[in-house]
Image (cartoon, grey):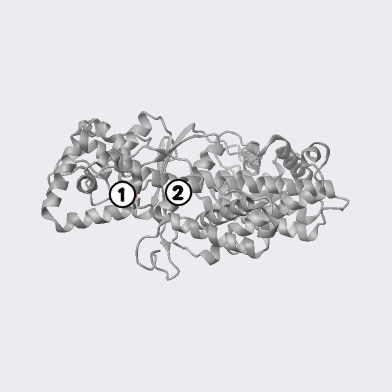
Amino acid sequence: MAAEQENVGNLKRKLAKLFQLSLDATVPGEPDIEPQVAACTAKFGDYQCNNAMGLWSKIKGRPGIEFRGPPAVGQAIMKNLPQSEMIESCSVAGPGFVNVVLSKNWMAQNIQKMLVDGIETWAPKLSIKRAVVDFSSPNIAKEMHVGHLRSTIIGDTLASMLEFSNVEVLRRNHVGDWGTQFGMLIEFLFEKFPNFEDVNETAIGDLQAFYKESKQRFDVDAEFKDRAQKAVVRLQSGEQMYRKAWAQICEISRREFDQVYQRLGVHLEEKGESFYNPHIPGVIEALTNQGLVEESKGARVIFIEGINIPLIVVKSDGGYNYASTDMTALWYRLNEEKAEWIIYVTDVGQQQHFDMVFKAAKRAGWFPADDRQYPKASHVGFGLVLGEDGKRFRTRSTEVVRLADLLDEAKTRSKAALIERGKAAEWTEEELEQTAEAVGYGAVKYADLKNNRLTNYTFDFDQMLNDKGNTAVYLLYAHARICSIIRKSGKDTEELKKTGKILLDHADERVLGLHLLQFAEVVEEACTNLLPNVLCEYLYNLSENFTRFYSNCQVVGSAEETSRLLLCEATAVVMRKCFFLLGIKPVYKI
Ligand code: ARG
């Protein structure tokens, strides 16, 4: 686990500390037993310690051990648990589970403390200072497609979770801005626009179409192909006109990408493949001097244990490739940028590539032998986006789906739904636009994030824009409803926080309170295991718990109004932090 320092909000860690003391006292001869603490799934308590059974099989039969089975070990663990204001009661169940019921006063106080001190006090504390998240990373002159949408959305969430944990994140857009395709693009540009330097995106129009057209030429016209291949060499040797044309094509592409990022509210810093070019020879030389690089079929390669194909770092024509760049980028991130955790977000199809790059780096001694230690690299893979027909998502013309069109449609549809609810009469046009955008884009993002990223998911507007079920629409409406409850009370929550007191007497209040308190451990899990769906599931359950509370506990006008308004506020605060981490803009009225 990455979080080594104390995290004040994390219940599981707090309990684990107590159980550590108890385990040390229960079996003094076994100093390194790690406490296994988990939230309870059954009704016996809030948390449980699961060490008794494993510990028993370890110590039974040893001289001096007086326990007569795991339940007795459980009893001893319970007896040795230090006094704590956190715990109301304990019990041992079944084969030796030690169940803990938390003190509701303690719970209430901690929720209130978060309201006063801010949700940042519940942030994970990781042991690293700087990370790279390599995400989005589309290719120049090719349209961003839904695969890049997934990378952008997932990567942004991971970066935000790390930032929330006080890690400095280098948000890297590793755009494909180098490679043989540029020869053909440049030649085509020269041909179509003799004054290429004045050319802008309006003249070129759709870069993707431009790419296609030039590719067609390349495939059928041998003379053009020959020129294109020579152009690559001239570009790589730094010939000015070629560099200029290249820069121009990159710039036009960049502007297109930026529009999508702006709409999604995602921030990235571009360091494309070309950035690493000057460093490649040095890195390959160092690897060669270490004896890692071998000659194979004319190419220079690194062999990796357990994988039957080697990692090609210099092609047989002497050129560099995707892997040469990735080895170099990794080297740069470790040595120049001093990143301790380097995270790559791409489709699972690239898993083997990254596996090989990481293993080669390990052979070179760039990473410690123990995988749990930093610096380390992780590949965050994700599955395909499928259409409603269950096949790879495409439009009717079997083209790749343009990202901008998807966002447009999501917004249009959510706007139509708002108008249907009569909002056009109630709101200003600006409010309508902003809400439609927040809900529409939020729906696209949430539909992507809520599934385990490794599974394929079906892109379905009707489903993602449904206001019932596990969708952003439902969650955003739930948040807006909470805000409206608070507004209608006419009370100032800033004031209530300081003067009022939270009580968790009703069973549904207690369930909601416990769920709120579990935010800290859930974000930590989502962040350290790189799984945004864990946070989505938490958010959905929070909403469900709130709904149950609200149906069974009268808020405004009740004797418990102050406490319940504070619970509403705490729920809204936690929901907003979840939305923020998931890249979703909250809405405040609906
Ligand atoms: N441009 C690549 C693609 O579209 C993704 C790059 C991922 N990052 C990396 N360092 N290789 O597939």
- Residue 199 seen in the current view: yes
Q: How many marks?
A: 2
Front disc: 1 or 2: 1
Secondary element under disc 2, as helix, strand or loop, is helix
Q: In the image, residue 82 lies at what x, y percent?
A: 71, 38
Which residue is disc 2 drawn over?
260
Q: Hey, which quadrant is residue 416 in on the image? A: bottom right
Q: Position of residue 230 (x, y in %)?
A: 14, 43
- Residue farthest to the bottom, as pictured: 389
Q: Earlier in the sequence, mark 1 or mark 2?
A: 1
**Residue 495, quarter of picture:** top right
Is residue 332 or residue 416 the one in the foreground? Answer: 416
Quadrant in the picture for the C terminus: bottom right
| Residue for point 34% across, 41% down | 251
**Of 4 and 297, which appears nearest the observer?**
297
What amino acid is at disc 1?
Ile
Q: Position of residue 242 (x, y in %)?
A: 21, 38
Residue at 69% of width from left, 41% of height from top? 80
Near-viewer residue (582 or 340): 582
| On screen, residue 552 above or below 56 | below
279 vs 571, left or right, is left
Label 2 crowd (10 A; few <14 / some 14-19 / many >=20)? some
Q: Quadrant of residue 377?
A: top left
Residue on which the image places disc 1 = 204
On screen, residue 367 above or below 176: above
Vertical order, 513 against 85 (above or below): below
